[in-house]
């Protein structure tokens, strides 16, 4: 993961800890410095500009004013964290892997993991989500329930007729035009706009049927990473990323727009790329 830092970047590197990078400095923060473990994974900034780092198993570490505080949450079901989303009611959606979706508000925690009245099966492995202005949430995960929309206590899942074996949805992203995009595990990319779902495959122009993460670029266009490149959905076109005359063929695991003309991409075994 990547997050903005004062005059630089924070990088979470699984197995290595946390790294600060700027034009003049680079240093790492590891378990011996206060991190829960070396396996830094997901990062989140709160309203006080604290940086929270999850390691998927041992809870959180919090960084503020150069001090680390180890925080292992008392509810063990939140140990394997995938994502946190704050709403405008001071509530928090917590996505855990294997123990359900949680909504925290004041001193109350609501756990969504059992079969609901409308037939949605157990939400055990939520992966990603987008919060809407009306308080509802679009959610995806490993459960094989396809694309889910939840509001209050009601969750509805959406599937294609042939979705049954391809219903693992990994990521969701909202473009600047409010169109939603979903990346699947092995079924291409899906968009949702004006109550219509559209399916994009390798025959539509995708690099493969195995998309990875979704990102937003400086123009709020949705981009998708693959193990062999990077593509952007712009209007009705699928665009490949080129560096000069050569197509970008690296895998991007994290993507951060630091300024309108400065974007960082972090990949597997390919270090850090800077686009200006």
Image (spheres, helix red, strand yellow):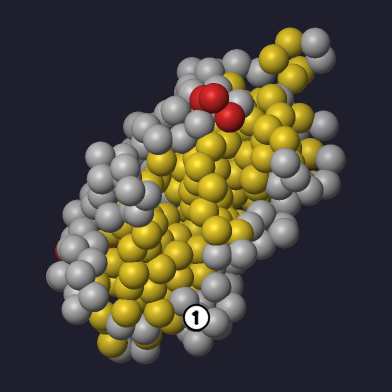
Where residue 130 appears, x then y in whole percent?
Answer: 50, 63
Residue that mark 1 sits on: 135
- Quarter of the C terminus within the rendering: top right
Nearest to the observer: residue 229 or residue 238: 238
Q: Inspect this view and state whether residue 77 appears.
A: no
Residue 212 horizontal/vertical position (percent): 46, 34
Residue at image position (35%, 54%) is 159
In the foreground, 182 or 128? 182
Graded by Cα atoms within 10 Å as few (under 14), some (14 to 19) or many (20 or more), the crowding at tag 1 reads few
* Residue at the image position 46 percent from the left and 35 percent from the top: 188
Percent across and percent down for residue 54 are: 37, 52
**How many numbered callouts?**
1
| Residue drawn at x 76%, y 18% as measured from the top left | 243
Quarter occupied by residue 78: bottom left
Tell me the element at label 1.
loop
As displayed, is residue 48 above or below residue 5?
Answer: below
Q: Is residue 28 left or right of residue 5?
A: left
Residue nearest the viewer, comparing 39 with 202: 202
The residue sitting at 74% across, 10% down in the picture is: 246
Question: Residue 95, percent across and down?
Answer: 34, 61
Residue 115 visible in the shown view: yes
Horizontal side, residue 13 vs residue 114: left or right = right
Query: Taking 17 as reference, is 240 above or below it?
Result: above
Left or right: residue 211 versus residue 229 is: left
Q: Residue furthest front?
A: 161
């Amino acid at each position: 993961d990547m997050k903005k830092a004062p005059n630089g970047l924070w990088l979470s590197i699984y197995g290595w800890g946390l790294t600060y990078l700027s034009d003049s400095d680079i240093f790492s923060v590891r378990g011996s410095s206060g991190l829960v473990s070396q396996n830094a994974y997901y990062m989140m900034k709160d309203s006080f500009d604290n940086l929270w780092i999850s390691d998927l198993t041992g809870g959180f570490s919090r960084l503020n004013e150069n001090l680390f505080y180890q925080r292992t949450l008392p509810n063990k079901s939140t140990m394997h964290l995938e994502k946190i989303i704050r709403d405008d009611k001071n509530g928090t959606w917590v996505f855990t892997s294997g123990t359900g979706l949680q909504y925290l508000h004041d001193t109350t925690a609501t756990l969504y993991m059992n079969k609901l009245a409308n037939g949605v099966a157990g939400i055990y492995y939520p992966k990603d989500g987008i919060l809407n202005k009306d308080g509802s949430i679009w959610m995806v995960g490993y459960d094989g329930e396809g694309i889910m929309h939840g509001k209050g206590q009601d969750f509805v899942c959406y599937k294609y007729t042939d979705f049954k074996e391809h219903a693992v949805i990994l990521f969701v992203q909202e473009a600047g035009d409010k169109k939603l995009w979903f990346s699947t595990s092995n079924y291409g990319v899906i968009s949702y706009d004006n109550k219509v779902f559209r399916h994009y495959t390798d025959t539509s122009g995708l690099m493969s049927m195995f998309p990875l993460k979704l990102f937003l670029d400086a123009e709020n266009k949705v981009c998708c990473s693959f193990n062999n490149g990077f593509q952007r959905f712009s209007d009705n076109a699928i665009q490949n990323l080129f560096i000069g005359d050569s197509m970008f063929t690296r895998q991007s695991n994290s993507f951060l727009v630091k300024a309108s003309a400065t974007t960082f991409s972090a990949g597997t075994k390919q270090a850090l790329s800077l686009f200006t």
